[in-house]
C-alpha cells in the first residue's frame, strides 16, 4: 500500500534520510523504529507530505503522496495538537470537518468513538481540563474518526495507563482487521511486540534492519534461557559462564556468556544442582535486537 523508494532528505549538511526504501501492506501494522535522531520523524513528515524528499519517491496505492487526498491519511504526532480552550465535542467536530465530514456526521462519530474508548460524557469538557492520558484519547479519535486507509501513530501510548493502553491496542487491531494499514513509531518495544507484523529499524538515517517480525527474530540467535527448577537457589544463580538476568524463587533467567557451549551443555551442568522442571531457550526480544543492531 505504501512504498518508500530510495528516499533522501537533507537539512543543510545533515543527511536525515539516506536512501531509505521500505513498504507496508494493507491490514498490517508496520513498526518504524530507531533511536532518537535516527530520522523517523523526517520520514513520517514526508509520508504525510508535510515536507518533500530531495530524492526518491513515496507512493500510496501507486500514487505520489502529493496526489493523495489527505482524507486517506490519519496522523497522530508525538506532540499534542489540541486547542485547549475548546470542548472535546468542538475539537473533534472541527477536525472531522477538516477531513471532509459534515458537521452532523462528525458529531455522530464523536459520540460513537467516545463511547467506544470509554470516554462517554466527555463532550462538554474543555481540553485543558483533561489529563494527559485523556487528551491522548481525544487526539487518537481525531486521527481515525474519518476512517483513513493509512494511520500513522507516533508514540500513541504516551500518558496512557496500562488499561487505556490495552484499549488502544485493541482498537488498532480492529482497524487492522478492517483493512487499515498502521505505521507505529514508538520506543516501547513491548507494544511493538504486541502489535507489529513488520518492522524497519532506522539508525543514522539508514534502514539497518527490516522485515516481518518473525523473520527478524529468527536472524538473531538467543543467548538467554528460562529455567524453572526445584533446588538450591544460590547454586542456580552461579552457573559457570552465565549471568543472571532475572530471578525469583524456583525460576531464573540466565544469559549465556560463552557461546562455545550449547544450551544442552548448560542444561547438563544445571542438572547437577537442581531438579529441572522447565528449560526454555528464550526468543530474542525486540528490545535486545534493537540494542544489538544499533550498537
Image: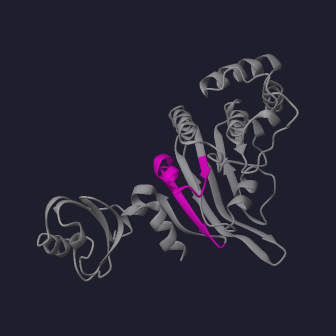
Q: Residue at x 79, y 16 (%)?
A: 104
Whether 109 is drawn above or below 154: the answer is above
Q: Which of 53 and 33 lies nearest the eye of the viewer?
A: 33
Up/down of 106 relative to 188, above or below: above
Residue occupying the point 55% across, 51% down: 30
Give percent across and percent down for residue 235: 21, 73
104 left or right of 134?
A: right
Q: Is residue 74 above or below residue 295?
A: above
Residue 193 on the magenta segment: yes
Image x and y of residue 117, in percent: 61, 28
Observer-nearest residue: 141 or 27? Answer: 141
Q: Is residue 131 visible?
A: yes
Q: Residue at x 76, y 50 (%)?
A: 79
Q: Horizontal placement of 39 versus 215: left or right?
A: right
Q: Is residue 1 visible?
A: no
Image position of 275 (left or right of 170): left
Quadrant assignment, res 207: bottom right
Report the magenta residues as a range. 183-204
* Residue 170 included in the magenta stretch of the image: no
Amino acid at each position: 500500500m505504501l512504498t518508500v523508494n530510495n528516499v533522501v532528505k537533507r537539512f543543510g549538511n545533515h543527511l536525515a534520510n539516506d536512501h531509505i526504501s521500505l513498504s507496508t501492506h494493507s491490514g498490517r501494522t508496520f513498526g518504524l523504529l530507531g533511536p532518537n535522531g535516527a530520522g523517523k520523524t523526517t520520514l513520517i513528515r514526508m509520508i504525510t507530505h508535510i515536507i518533500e524528499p530531495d530524492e526518491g519517491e513515496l507512493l500510496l496505492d501507486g500514487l505520489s503522496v502529493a496526489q493523495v487526498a489527505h482524507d486517506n491519511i490519519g496522523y497522530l504526532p508525538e506532540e499534542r495538537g489540541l486547542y485547549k480552550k475548546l470542548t472535546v465535542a468542538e475539537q473533534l467536530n472541527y477536525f472531522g470537518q477538516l477531513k471532509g465530514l459534515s458537521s452532523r456526521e462528525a458529531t455522530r462519530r464523536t459520540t460513537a468513538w467516545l463511547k467506544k474508548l470509554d470516554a462517554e460524557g466527555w463532550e462538554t469538557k474543555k481540553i485543558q481540563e483533561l489529563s494527559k492520558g485523556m487528551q491522548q484519547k481525544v487526539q487518537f479519535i481525531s486521527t481515525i474518526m474519518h476512517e483513513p486507509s493509512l494511520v500513522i501513530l507516533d508514540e500513541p501510548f504516551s500518558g496512557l495507563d496500562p488499561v487505556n493502553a490495552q484499549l488502544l491496542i485493541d482498537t488498532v487491531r480492529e482497524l487492522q482487521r478492517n483493512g487499515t494499514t498502521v505505521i507505529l513509531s514508538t520506543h516501547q518495544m513491548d507494544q511493538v511486540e504486541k502489535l507489529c507484523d513488520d518492522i524497519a529499524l532506522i539508525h543514522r538515517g539508514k534502514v539497518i534492519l527490516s522485515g516481518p517480525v518473525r523473520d527478524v527474530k529468527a536472524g538473531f540467535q538467543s543467548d538467554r534461557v528460562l529455567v524453572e527448577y526445584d533446588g538450591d537457589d544460590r547454586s542456580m544463580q552461579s552457573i559457570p559462564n552465565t549471568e543472571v538476568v532475572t530471578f525469583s524463587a524456583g525460576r531464573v533467567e540466565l544469559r549465556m556468556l560463552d557461546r562455545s557451549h550449547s544450551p544442552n551443555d548448560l542444561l547438563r551442568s544445571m542438572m547437577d544442582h537442581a531438579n529441572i522442571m522447565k528449560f526454555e531457550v528464550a526468543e530474542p526480544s525486540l528490545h535486545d535486537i534493537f540494542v544489538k543492531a544499533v550498537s
